[in-house]
Image (cartoon, grey):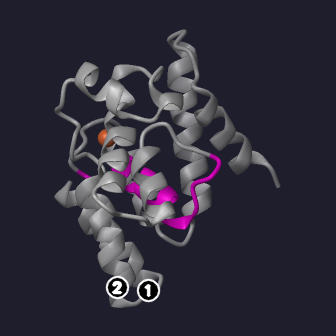
């Protein structure tokens, strides 16, 4: 989470965002995986009804967003970014797309380090192009293994692929 927050802070700074916005971007990095280690079946009844059918591995995003909302966070873009950081959503805007990218590109992950370092080098200014490549790679991975695609992921791809 620290590495994701660090990347988001650096990107927010490169975009020239004011300090308050930078803090908001960092907070998304710190909070998005707050419930990652919780038992998915404990989280399932605590997410909104339209999310309760999601696979266990991706419930921690919607659960963290719902918990923050109950605790008084009313920043819709922020909550959506946290909720959809794994599955994506066509409703993700700059912060949500940046969190999606940072979570995938943070240097602590050990798969395809060279490809991911190349994508990091193009951030944040090629944000949409980089996110498109990540979504494409994730979808390819799932399809090759015969794993079902979630509607939000497909809608995210369609939003990125459309001119
Ligand atoms: Fe996560």
- Mark 1 lies on a secondary structure that is loop
**Contact (Cβ within 8 Å) of mark 1 with mark 2:** no
Q: Residue at x 28, y 29 (%)?
A: 43
Q: Residue at x 68, y 38 (%)?
A: 155
Nearer to me, 148 or 116: 148
Q: Quadrant of the C terminus?
A: bottom right
Say whether residue 99 is magenta.
Answer: yes
Q: Quick check: 36 above or below 79?
A: above
Is there any visible trace of residue 122 in the rendered image? no
In which quarter of the view is residue 28 placed? bottom left
Q: Position of residue 1 (x, y in %)?
A: 21, 54
Figure quadrant of residue 117: bottom left
Cα–Cα span, label 1 and label 2: 8 Å
Q: How would you rate the neighbour count of disc 1 (Cα within 10 Å): few for under 14, some for 14-19, many for 20 or more?
A: some
> Which dot marks residue 17?
1
Residue 154 place in picture, x, y as percent = 66, 33
Left or right of residue 77, residue 117 in this image: left
Residue at 73% across / 41% down in the picture? 158
Beta carbon of the mark 1 residue lies under 8 A of ligand 1: no
Q: From this viewpoint, is residue 104 visible?
A: yes
Identify the magenta region. 90-107
Residue at 24% x, 38% y: name it: 110
Image location of residue 133, percent across then percent down:
57, 46
Q: Outermost residue toward the right?
A: 163
Residue 44 drawn above or below residue 126: above
Q: Main secondary structure of the magenta part?
A: helix
Q: Which residue is mark 2?
A: 20
């Amino acid at each position: 989470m620290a590495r994701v927050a660090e990347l988001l802070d650096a990107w927010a700074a490169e975009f020239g965002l004011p300090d308050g916005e930078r803090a908001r971007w960092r907070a998304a990095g710190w909070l998005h995986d707050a419930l990652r280690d919780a038992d998915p079946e404990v989280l399932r009844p605590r997410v909104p009804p339209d999310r309760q059918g999601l696979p266990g591995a991706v419930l921690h995003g919607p659960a963290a967003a719902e918990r923050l909302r109950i605790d008084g966070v009313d920043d819709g873009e922020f909550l959506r970014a946290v909720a959809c950081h794994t599955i994506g959503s066509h409703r993700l805007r700059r912060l949500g797309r940046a969190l999606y990218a940072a979570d995938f590109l943070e240097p602590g992950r050990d798969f395809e380090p060279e490809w991911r370092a190349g994508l990091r080098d193009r951030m944040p200014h090629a944000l949409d192009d980089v996110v498109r490549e990540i979504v494409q790679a994730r979808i390819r991975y799932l399809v090759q293994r015969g794993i079902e695609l979630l509607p939000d992921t497909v809608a995210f791809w369609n939003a990125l692929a459309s001119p």
